[in-house]
Image: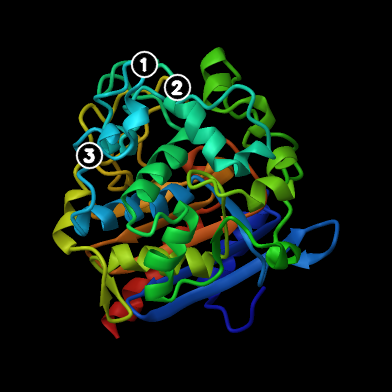
Amino acid sequence: MTAAVDPRIARGLEIAVERGEVGVQVAAWLGEALIVDAAIGTADETSGLAADGALFPIFSVTKAATATAVHLQAERGLLDLDAPIATCWPEYAAHGKADITPRHVLTHRAGVPQMPPDVTPERLSDWDWIVGELAQMRPMQPPGEVSIYHSISYGYLLGEVLRRTDPQGRMPCAFIRDELFAPIGVEDFWIGLPASESPRVARLTWGPSGPSAGVARTALREAMIPLAIDVTPEVYNRRELQAACNPAAGGIASAKGVARFFGLLANGGALAGRRLISEARLRACLEPRANYEEVDAGIGFATLLGMAGYQLGGGRTGASPVLGTSPAVLAHGGAGGSLAWADLDSGLAVAITHNRMFGAVPADRHPFQPLADAVREVAAEATRT
């Protein structure tokens, strides 16, 4: 465990290990102050890599960065969230997709959750091939009608929108790095990991209890996430997956880096003396999407999603209890349990990264609940002093 850790945070980390975790990082920013930065355990049991200083796969936590980049383009007047994607990507109108908008994708109601069935780990890096295949897909459902989680397609669809609306035509992962992360000092948050950082990457595991039951591999699940790129340790420990520009699930990061990015949201769109997004736009993201209690056809449970690409907190149906009860939380979780959130009312931004993947867990046994409660306690105390 890192030195000089608040005893409440230290105990929260210990409980996480007692409940099955192997290596965990937690970080929290309150404005420009890093109030929590701690780790426990081992990031790679084979090599002995410590959790402290490691980088962790964060899966769909990555979606929050991609959504924010989309809002950045909207803020600049380069993108209308409610105009058809085909406005900037004409080829995408093929086969009945002319009315699909970025907002449909952000809210997982575009009806196009599928990936090319012959995708491979290597092909995840072939951007032009994937978006070409997605342009030829036929919708499973009309846009706006059914919630089907766009596990991987989310990032490629919105990423191509970013590329098409960027005057420089950059790949989305370069755009996110240059336009979103660099201006506010985000470090150790990679979407498309350079080879130089590979030695620091944690090795994912199912932990001492063995593989999680996860989500059943139905035909729909197979279309959403073909087996070759399934969100499992066996697949995502591969360097090809980590190196790919996968803006939906490919983030490799430290908790400190992820929490720094979420600090932009927690502080109403301004950080490090730079305003990137208006507070009004971010506050509008707190509005739940219509029928938010609907069970998602792809993942089999309800997820509290807002109108603009973030998961929400506030103790409502579909919200993770780890996020607390604040109604002003923008968040995103990832496969296996990684989680980050921003509280727009308190200015608190938190991230928890780890390497032991787990599925659904009751709130009273969730490995990160005591840790999250401890972070909020520390933050409340820091606010008072």
Marked residue nearer the N-terminal end (1 or 2): 1
Q: Which label is found at residue 136?
A: 2
Quick one: 248 or 216, which is closer to the camera? 248
Cα–Cα gap, marks 2 and 3:
31 Å
Q: Secondary structure at mark 1?
A: loop
Q: Quadrant of the N terminus?
A: bottom right
Q: Secondary structure at mark 2?
A: loop
Cα–Cα gap, marks 1 and 3:
30 Å
Whether label 1 touches label 2, CB < 8 Å: yes
The residue pinned by badge 1 equals 95
Marked residue nearer the N-terminal end (1 or 3): 1
Q: Is residue 49 above or below residue 92?
A: below
Q: Secondary structure at mark 3?
A: loop
Describe the colour scheme in one phrase: rainbow
**From the viewer's perspective, is the residue at label 1 or at label 3 nearer?**
1
The residue pinned by badge 3 equals 288
How far from the left and from the top, in percent, is residue 306? 26, 41
Q: Which label is found at residue 71?
A: none
Marked residue nearer the N-terminal end (2 or 3): 2
How far from the left and from the top, in percent, is residue 195? 71, 62
Q: Which residue is located at x 32 percent, y 77 percent?
A: 31
Quick one: 299 or 359, which is closer to the camera? 299
Q: Quadrant of the C terminus?
A: bottom left
Q: Is residue 168 above or below residue 4?
A: above
Q: Is residue 145 above or below residue 65?
A: above
Q: Amino acid at mark 2?
A: Gln
